[in-house]
Amino acid sequence: MDKPFQRRGAESNTQVGRDFEAKAQFFFAQQGLDLTPGMTVEIGINGRKSHSFDLGDEQKKVIVECKAHTWTEGGNVPSAKMTTWNQAMFFFHAPPPGYRKILFILRDFSQKRNETLGEYYIRTNPHLIPNDVGVWEYDEKQGTAKKIK
């Protein structure tokens, strides 16, 4: 069966996400931050409802959303995927005060645009990103990450 919106060579997009979350968890563990998958926090603007963040630490009050999206094969913006980044920013507006908030993304550089997908997102959506959110890009080849905001 042809799956046109599935990453080439991937078992499933869900598996790509899970594998990336595991890489994020390993990276932060190397930095001395032991995060738990699927940490639930009560979030809300008017009232509260449970939301499961990809990773987190209740004691240290850290929440992480992971995104392993890439430019399209044609080098275009994956606009439908960007809506999930916007949704993550909304969730980062809504937890109780005191949480450290991290968007952990896959570093994907576009020769055509001369920027990474993360740099593109920050440049085009600064109005959506809360000031207290750190954006980290993970380089899969190097196994390293760098804070870009």
Image (spheres, grey):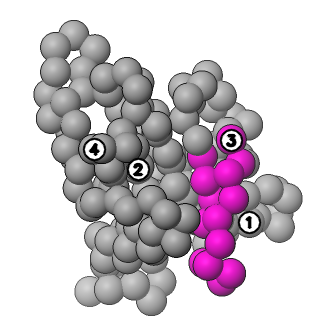
Alpha-carbon span between mark 1 and mark 2: 20 Å
Alpha-carbon span between mark 3 and mark 2: 15 Å
Taking the spot 64% from the left edge, 65% from the top edge, the residue there is 145
Crowd tier of the residue under label 1, counting other residues whose Cα lies within 10 Å: few below 14, some 14–19, many 20 or above: some
Alpha-carbon span between mark 4 and mark 3: 23 Å
Residue carrying label 1: 109
Q: Earlier in the sequence, mark 1 or mark 2?
A: 2
Write the start and end of the magenta stretch as one range: 135-149
Alpha-carbon span between mark 2 and mark 4: 15 Å
Is 7 left, or right, of 17 in this rendering?
right
Q: Earlier in the sequence, mark 3 or mark 2?
A: 2
Q: Are marks 3 and 1 in contact (CB under 8 Å)?
A: no
Residue carrying label 4: 58
Alpha-carbon span between mark 3 and mark 1: 16 Å
Is 7 left, or right, of 78 in this rendering?
left
Q: Position of residue 11 (x, y in %)?
A: 32, 86
Q: Are marks 1 and 4 in contact (CB under 8 Å)?
A: no
